[in-house]
Image (cartoon, rainbow, N blue to C red):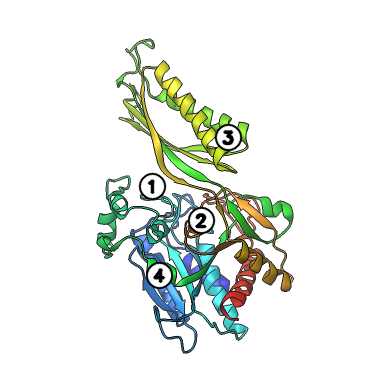
Amino acid sequence: MSFATLWESLLPIGRDGLSGGYRRFSWTPEDAACRAWFTRSAAERDLRVLTDNNGNLWAWWDPPGWPGPGAPGGAKAVVTGSHLDSVPDGGAFDGPLGVVSAFAAVDLLRERGCLPVRPLGIAAFSEEEGGRFGVACLGSRLLAGAIEPGRARALADAAGVTLAEAMAAAGHDPDGIGPDDDLLAAVGAYVELHVEQGRALADLGAAVAIGEQIWPHGRWRLDFTGRPDHAGTATLADRRDPMLPFAAAVLAARQAAAAHGARATIGKVTAEPGAVNAVSARVSAWLDARGPDERTLQTVVGEVLAAAREAAAGHGVELAAGPESVTPAVVFDQDLRERLASSLAEQGIPAPLLPTGAGHDAGVLAARVPTAMLFVRNPTGVSHSPAEHAESADCAAGVRALATVLEDLACR
Ligand SMILES: [Zn+2]
């Protein structure tokens, strides 16, 4: 089956008719449809499907005569994949490109007559974007023991539904979530293919790149508490308006990022009670910050929080601020990276090395398993938006590159 057929079978799920963007949030009906698509695609290829305790999906191509999962002396698996969930109104490629390319690469390996000598797995990790419960890479974090299960169960979505409730409603037992050391110990390498979320490859004139490192990054929550008041009668001098220090924080984020060659974004904000004709009681904002190294990241966040604190004090507003999740820099496994580079070079596939400011499940898993990434060119670099794109020829190049890497890692 071709990449295009697979791609088009997934495309309608969770697409918003108005924005053209995707709303595939974990443990919703759209998520269930994506899971059914995964299971169907695996079944069409005679792959063995299982859902792990944390709701991550796995499709296994077992080598002939393989003794079965967990058997003593069994070879460690090679796993590829990505995620199927989206940010609100996200693009079609972020996540799904890696999963679709994984199935297409299996097809290509079979066309080439390759048989794995160790298990080859395709994974789709749950809630990678944190689009519903606010913590990015939740499925892989749980698997790797990078988040405490009790804390994860209590995470709530915008409607106040907890992860535990959402999982249970979708038929998945939330009591079983948490680290799965046996599963991770069975994985010898993880290679994630992902659409590039910048435009470096477009400038380099290459279709595919090998990931070098992921910038350290994190999310900080800022709660500004002031005093609700009448927009017409409260004098300016008497106001304690939380919107003003919030605005200072937005500007400080931009300035600090520009000053230090980093990224800082406030892309989510809520105002309570949210009346047009009233001074807000409270403004909550989320700062997303990323930098080329940890010191730069801390400097940027420190400057934003200092500016927010100073502005809050100046307006008689209280500020509570702290991290929601922070992920250190990830440098991908050098041996694996070099092996990818040499197998691609052998096939005449040019693949420069690329750092990225975007977080991935591969970044979380890198703490436990040798991990590598492949990026596929995005002509405009736009991502987390309906305008996110990759050309068909580049998607095909990505599948070829992934199949080449998997053949080297799993079939020899
Ligand atoms: Zn992604």
Q: Secondary structure at mark 4?
A: helix
Q: Position of residue 127 (x, y in %)?
A: 40, 56
Q: Secondary structure at mark 1?
A: loop
Q: How many residues crowd around disc 2 within 10 Å: few (fewer than 14), some, or many (20 or more)?
A: many
Q: Amino acid at mark 1?
A: Gly
Callout 1 touching callout 4 (CB < 8 Å): no
Q: Which mark is residue 183?
A: 4
Q: Position of residue 326 (x, y in %)?
A: 45, 45
Considering only order in the chain, which callout, 2 or 1, is on the residue closer to the N terminus? 1
Measured along the vertical axis of the image, is residue 80 above or below residue 95? below
The answer to whether residue 318 is visible is: yes
Snapshot quadrant of residue 55: bottom left
Considering only order in the chain, which callout, 1 or 3, is on the residue closer to the N terminus? 1
Q: Amino acid at mark 3?
A: Ala
Q: Residue at x 47, y 56 (%)?
A: 364
Q: Which mark is residue 257?
A: 3
Distance in Å between CA atoms under marks 2 and 3: 22 Å
Distance in Å between CA atoms under marks 4 and 2: 17 Å
Considering only order in the chain, which callout, 4 or 3, is on the residue closer to the N terminus? 4
Q: Amino acid at mark 2?
A: Gly
Q: Secondary structure at mark 2?
A: helix
Residues 368 and 262: in front is 368
Residue at the spot of label 1? 134
